[in-house]
Image (spheres, rainbow, N blue to C red):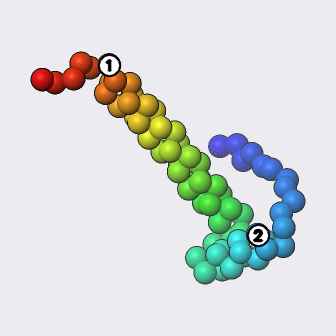
Amino acid sequence: MVNNKFLIDISQDIYQTVHFLAQRDNVTEEVKVVEILEDFLETQEDEGWNKIAEDRETKDALAHAPAR
């Protein structure tokens, strides 16, 4: 497995939050950042699928003739 890396600058507030969460969960700060990023990306993907489903429902609802 290849470990890809990013070198980023973050604010002191974000660093302190990540540090606190990592200590709380007894993991390294790097592991905590990866967990947070994975959760965020999963949420973004879910929101994308929900948008697609909502668009489909709207199109289907408009495509059918009204019931009599």
Q: Nearer the viewer, mark 2 or mark 1?
A: 1
| Vertical arrangement, residue 37 with respect to residue 68, above or below | below
| Vertical arrangement, residue 37 with respect to residue 19, above or below | above
In this image, 49 relative to 66: left or right? right
Tell me which amino acid carries mark 1: Ala
Residue 48 horizontal/vertical position (percent): 51, 39
Q: Can residue 60 be seen here?
A: yes
Residue drawn at point x = 72 percent, y = 63 percent:
30
Gap between marks 2 and 1 measured at Cα: 48 Å
Q: Can residue 49 be seen here?
A: no
Q: Residues within 10 Å of mark 2 (few under 14, many from 20)?
A: few
* Quarter occupied by the C terminus: top left
Residue 17 horizontal/vertical position (percent): 71, 75
Tell me which amino acid carries mark 2: Ile
Which type of secondary structure does the marked residue at label 1 adopt?
Answer: helix
In this image, 63 relative to 40: left or right? left
Residue drawn at point x = 65 percent, y = 66 percent:
32
Which type of secondary structure does the marked residue at label 2 adopt?
Answer: helix
Q: Earlier in the sequence, mark 2 or mark 1?
A: 2
| Vertical arrangement, residue 57 with respect to residue 36, above or below | above
Residue 30's label in the rendered image is none
Number of disc labels: 2
List the residue tagged with mark 1: 63
Residue 12 horizontal/vertical position (percent): 84, 73
List the residue tagged with mark 2: 14
* Quarter occupied by the N terminus: top right
